[in-house]
Each structure stands twice: as structure tokens, then as C-alpha cells.
Image: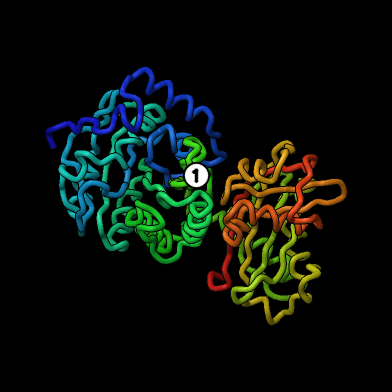
Amino acid sequence: MSHVRPPAVAGLFYPADARELADSVDRMLAAAPEPDAYSRVVIAPHAGHMYSGEIAAFAYRQLDPATSRIAVLGPCHRVGIDAMTLTGASAQRTPLGELPTDTELTQRIAAMTDVIEAPVVHAQEHSIEVHLPFIQRRFGTDTRVLPIAVGRTDPTFVADVIEEILAEDDTAIIISTDLSHYLPEADTHQVDAATIGQILEMSGTITGFQACGCYPVSGLLAYGRRVGLRGSVLAAGTSADTSGDSSRAVGYVAMAFSSSPADSALPALAYNAIARQLSAPEIDVVGSIPEGLGTSFVTLSALGRLRGCMGGLVAVRELSEDIAAHAVAAAFSDPRFPPLSKDELATLDIDVSVLSPPSPPCTFESATEACAALRPGVDGVILSYGPHRATFLPQVWHQLPQPEVFLRHLLAKAGLDPESWHDDIEVSTYTVTSHELKASER
């Protein structure tokens, strides 16, 4: 590796002036929240900074700022190739300076299946370059990078590369992708909600219709199935949010992933609360239970069908007590279902959603205005009007991906006319961290 790869899209996808670029990136990073716990794997969009930068900033903030090297796996837009490609460059240049390529990690990855050196693939490619200014401002100019442009490659081989990269504790991975392209905004929300749901479930492979980064994302899913990776949505939106053009929208999402054993601790706690009621054996709780007040929803499914769901919106007790109480209520007190039987326990899938504090309530002059304020796939929504009150968890977006349809069903759930809107209806939003334990995993 001897040459330095120069910027190809400075002045097009992001500012070419160093001061303007630094100020812009810093502003977007400052607007995204710092997480309670860092992740080592994220998905971030790669459109022009003005379109997707604010969403991508959520992903960068999810990575530990002390990370010393970062691999970026992005798709090939300019040159089609049946391989994963390395740059062959000693550094990557942006208007903010140069980022050194991690030579040691590059040498290891270069020896793996379907990995080749192909500078021509990287020369005009933007899917990796747009992330570099954020890396420079978030992690520093000494951070080593490993750019990999992923062409048409078997997901198993991509997963092998991801596993090799993450074998180093000081390394993080950015999976670079946008979602659906150039659909009407309503269709974009619908397609993207289904894609996000598939990623959260770690199921199958992603197609080019769903995401331009279908090959790196499919590799992530293959890796995730190996190690029990769990995902969460940090932010989502479309190009129409900034351009105003709803006729040809592009979808964006920022996601974080973790394989922490604590992910199964909360649903195990819920399972044991139900098992005690049925005088059935309990299971081991692997991982720690967060301390302090908290509120949750517990959703039970059996053989792929909803079997009960109960929860609350206000934190009034310890989170562990809240989960146990709602698990028992979902199993035995959901009025839509008969009480759970002991025979059903073995088939039970459990999802525990831990809720963030809700946003202050807002009012909107119309349902259209309210829909525009919602983030499909991200926001749980609380709707209140006099004695009427209802909520949908963010998971409901998977079944009702269009904001207008989502809101109409929520109005109906609250006992209101789904075709009418009152300008003093109050809307609050929240996010959830989802923890799932399937029957097959116990």
C-alpha cells in the first residue's frame, strides 16, 4: 500500500471546505444522543450529509469514542464485482486530512475467501467516503480505518470477514447502506419498515430493492445469526424529510447491534414469573438486570401467534418488578385470550420492551401534520384525548408501516373515530429497547 485515496465526492455529498465540513459534522454529532452503553456494530446511511447525515450521526455516537480502528463495509455503486474489495491505499484523504489504513488488519482480511485488492472499485465510490469525516471528528485523525467495498458476495463469506474484524476488541464496524430508492414516500415507509423488521429478526437475506447495501447487510444478518446479535433502531427517515420531494424518496436508518448476554436476562425474568404461577421449572437468568425505576411491555407469542400483551407507560416501580407483573398479566389477564396453560409454556416466545420516558405531549392541527412528526419504525406513540388513551409500540410499524394507517388504527384503539381529528388530541412519543427470548433458545 503506497498511494493515498483522494476524496471523490467532496463538494457533492458533503462540503469541500474543511472548516464548513468540520462545523457541519460537529453540529450533527452534537444533536445525536450519547448512549447508555456503546455498541461495536452499527448500520448508518451514506447519502449526502444534508439528506442522511443527521440520522447517521446517531450511529456514530453509538460507537465508543476511544475506538482505535473502524472497518466500513459499503456497497459498490460504480463498479460491479463479485468480491469484497480493499483499496490498496495507505490512507484515505478528506478535506479534514488523512486517515491511515490499518495495515495489520488489511493483511489478515486480504487472505480470506472472496477478498481482493481493487483500487478501481473504490476510486469513485461514495458509500465509504461519506463516513470518513464523521470518523475524523468523532474518533480523531489517528484512527485507523479498513474500507471494504462489498460486491456480489455470498453472505457467509461476508460474515466470516465481520467475525475476523470483531475478533479485535478495539475495532468497530460500520455497515453502510441506504434503504429503498426512489419510491413515493408512503411506499418508502412501507418497504423500509418491513426491511427494518427483517434486520431486527436477523432473518434471510436483503435484496437490492430493499437496500443498496444488500450484500454487506446480508452478511451482517448471517453473522448475527451465528452469535445471537440483537439490533435496535436509533433513528429512521427519508430524503423527503429534508428535500420536501415525496414523489421519489430514499429511505435511511441508523441501527446498533449487541450480543450482550443481558439481552436475554429480561425475558428470562418474565418467563420465570409466569412459570412460578404455573408451578413449572424456572430457567437461568444470564446477565444483569438494570436497577432503578422503569416501565415495560411484555408480549407473548405462541407458535407465531400473539398470546398476550400487557404493559404500562409510567415508571412507578423497579424495572424487574414491572416486567414480572406485566408478564403475569399478559399470560393470565389479557382479556383477548384465555389464561395461559402449563402445556403452552414450552411454545412461548417472549419479548420485553423497555420504554424510554415519553416526550412532552404535542398537539397538531391535522392528522397529516401529526403523521409528518412521527418516525416510522422508531417511535412508540401515545395518543390522548379526554378520557381516551392508547399506545402502539414501535414494533407495530412492522404491521402498519404507513403513518396514516398507523394513526387511524391508534385512534380506533383509543375509542375515537379513525376518520376524524381533533386539534386538542395530544401525541407523545417514546422509544423502546427490545429483548426477545424464543422458545427454541431455552
For label 1, the residue is 246
Q: Is residue 186 left or right of residue 112?
A: right
Of residues 435 and 428, the one nearer the viewer is 428
Task: State whether residue 319 appears in this view.
Answer: yes
Q: Give the percent coordinates (x, y) of residue 222.
A: 38, 62
Q: Is residue 120 left or right of residue 315?
A: left
Q: Residue at x 74, y 38 (%)?
A: 363
Mark 1: few/some/many CA within 10 Å (<14, 14-19, 20+): some
Of residues 197 and 239, the one nearer the viewer is 239
Quarter of the view holding residue 20: top left
Q: Is residue 37 above or below residue 319?
A: above
- Furthest-left residue in view? 2
Task: State whether residue 63 appears in this view.
Answer: no
Q: How is the image coloured?
A: rainbow
Q: Is residue 61 above or below residue 151?
A: above
Quarter of the view holding residue 215: bottom left
Of residues 335 and 324, the one nearer the viewer is 335
- Furthest-right residue in view? 387
Q: Residue at x 45, y 25 (%)?
A: 26
